[in-house]
Amino acid sequence: MKEALNPAEVAEAAVESVTTENNTPGQRYQLSFERPTDNALLVRLAGRWRLEEKLPPVTEVQAQLESGAAVTRVQLDTTRLAAWDTGLLTFLAGLYTLCQKRGIAFDNAGLPDGVRKLIDLAFAVPPQKDTGRRGELPPVLARIGDATLKLLRGAPEMIGFIGKVTLSLGRLVRGRAQYRRSDLMLIIQDVGPQALPIVSLISFLVGLIVAYMGAVQLAQFGAQIYIADLVGIGVVREMGALMTGIIIAGRTGAAFAAQLGTMQVNEEIDAFKALGISPMDFLVLPRMLALIIMMPLLVLYADIVGVLAGMFVANTTFDISVFEYYQQTARALDLRHFAVGISKGTVYGILIAIAGCLRGMQCGRSAQAVGQATTSAVVTSIVFIVIAASLMTIMFQKLGI
Amino acid sequence: MAAVPAQQMQTEAHITVQDLTMAYGDFVIQRDLNFVVRRGDIFIIMGGSGCGKSTLLRHLIGLKAPAKGEVFYDDVNFWRAEPDEQERMKRKFGVLFQSGALWSSLTLAENVALPLGEYMDLSPTRIREVVSLKLALVGLAGFEEFYPSEISGGMQKRAGLARAMALDPDILFFDEPSAGLDPISSRRLDDLILELRDSLGATVVVVTHELASIFAIGNNSVFLDPESKTMIATGDPKDLVESENPTVRTFLTRGES
Ligand SMILES: Nc1ncnc2c1ncn2[C@@H]1O[C@H](COP(=O)(O)OP(=O)(O)OP(=O)(O)O)[C@@H](O)[C@H]1O
Ligand SMILES: [Mg+2]
């Protein structure tokens, strides 16, 4: 706003008095300057100095300091000040800082008592310097670099976590792990029985879809009876475990991350460490055990529901009797297939527990960090599950199981 | 507003509490509370731990409806007012919670700036200036870009105070502002509270146990007793030292007289 004025004019005007006014009706403040002596500047504040008026920036005073003879002293006159609040204080704080920076004396004698005391309080504690913080974002390249380094640091952290979990399992085997049975039981209940409705629904629908799609194709050759083989092998070996894994990742993995993350925010995990209780044993181990125990059972349950869904489709749409379907399924399936599906499910369970607990323990100290930990736990679990599923499918094929 | 001397303002009632009963479900915390906070008072809520001081604040600031009784601001019955009216009244409150309650995913500067940005029409530069001033007033200049988890407990308390003062509220509610502060910071806080009252004309309601603070700043108070579940004294704490009630006297003299 000052660029409009020619510096020579400002200097000239300063000799008499320069006044900036805000003349919106009902909202008015006055800022005027005088030079009582050559090297003193008198700042006169009058009218209403409140936040809601559009108050002038300190640069207006700065312009005055820069024009005319060098100023060594700033004085204030507030005799005609009508009302004030934080607006005036911010202006004066800015002026005070400006004076300090330029080595100009700030004479606060002209201020009302309350204002003087508040300004004193504001500058009683010198600002903290060298905090290494700046408001603005670092440049793009630096941010890319930081993100990459963070990604690279992720891998050792994960391996370290797996190591710690293994040690903790070792302590469990030797009966020296510190955890509470009742916690384990509660987690088991939450992970297993409470998940039955959603597992039932999803596995029934998936079984239904596999059966229906397969049957339409097989019917072209009059081979509808092989729906039983298709559903049996597909669900038991692959789909049952995969679907259960994904459901549990979204349900339980997310819950683990949110629980541990919130505990991290409240320093509850630090409280365990301070007591000499390993959070690995006390918090991670029961969660891991609960999933190792419950996943096989959930997968078995999902397999059975899936096969029943196939039977339902075959019976209602393709007139295959329940007994025939049962016979055909029994011929197609043997224990081997169940073992494959259940072992896959158990691996998924372990991966979900690792991802959920790891992300929870890594959580930062804010509400937002808990959200990120939860999201990241689900994404990590699903990525792990899909990779493990592919590897194990190939492995079992090669081994001929 | 700065021109009105504190003494003059202290005659009119600002907050009036009538027959207030506080309860969580069937669990009655305090009953039959009656007291008046005058405009420009620094009003102290005293009492042993767990007697219901924080709960009383929650009734005053509109977070929890009382089981029974009324709270008046000037002449308006807060809990009978329309929701719009309640929101308008709440905007004039500044609250410091016992746990600080800073928003954990915002920096200190953003914490203080949020109410300013929501309720006032200010430019970003002006907001930054106001934020710096408020943080400087509580001795936190230079910590603008820190997150709440990165500062100490006492600093979190002070940052909460800066946020409570953001909108130059009419009434400030502080729940144990000096808990966790060293004697010097605690003293500076007392000075700040006095200045907020004297210069900006705010009414201040403070929950505190610090005897030094109680006598230095308080000019009115209420004493809640956990045993009888009601208030057993109200008035200037300096007069309550002479109270005939032994509980109050013991509290205010730390049992030393
Ligand atoms: N959400 C709640 N549900 C049930 N009871 C509660 C709840 N919050 C507090 N209480 C009970 O209310 C009583 C008063 O609690 P309040 O937090 O108001 O105490 P206080 O006086 O502020 O104590 P302190 O000085 O320790 O902060 C306590 O007995 C507490 O058990
Ligand atoms: Mg409390």
Image (tube, coloured by chain):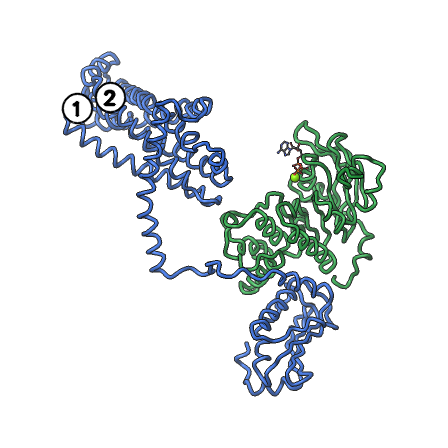
Residue bearing mark 1: A401
Q: In which quarter of the image is ligand 2?
A: top right
Of the numbered discs 2 and 1, the one sitting upstream in the chain is 2
Which chain can be seen in green?
B
Local crowd at mark 1 within 10 Å, few (<14), some, or many (≥20)?
few
Provide the chain ID for the residue under circle 1: A
Disc 2 vs disc 1: Cβ atoms closer than 8 Å? yes
Residues beneath discs 2 and 1 located on the same chain? yes
Residue bearing mark 2: A339
- Is A237 situated above or below B221? above
Which chain can be seen in blue?
A
Location of residue A174 by image quarter: top left
Q: In x, y percent, where is residue B10?
A: 81, 53
Give the residue at x 69% y 32%: B23
- Is B177 situated above or below A210? below
Provide the chain ID for the residue under circle 2: A
Location of residue B192 by image quarter: bottom right
User: As shown in the figure, which amino acid type bears the numbered disc 1?
Assistant: Ile
Location of residue A223 by image quarter: top left
Q: In x, y percent, where is residue B28?
A: 70, 30
Q: In x, y percent, where is residue A128?
A: 54, 60
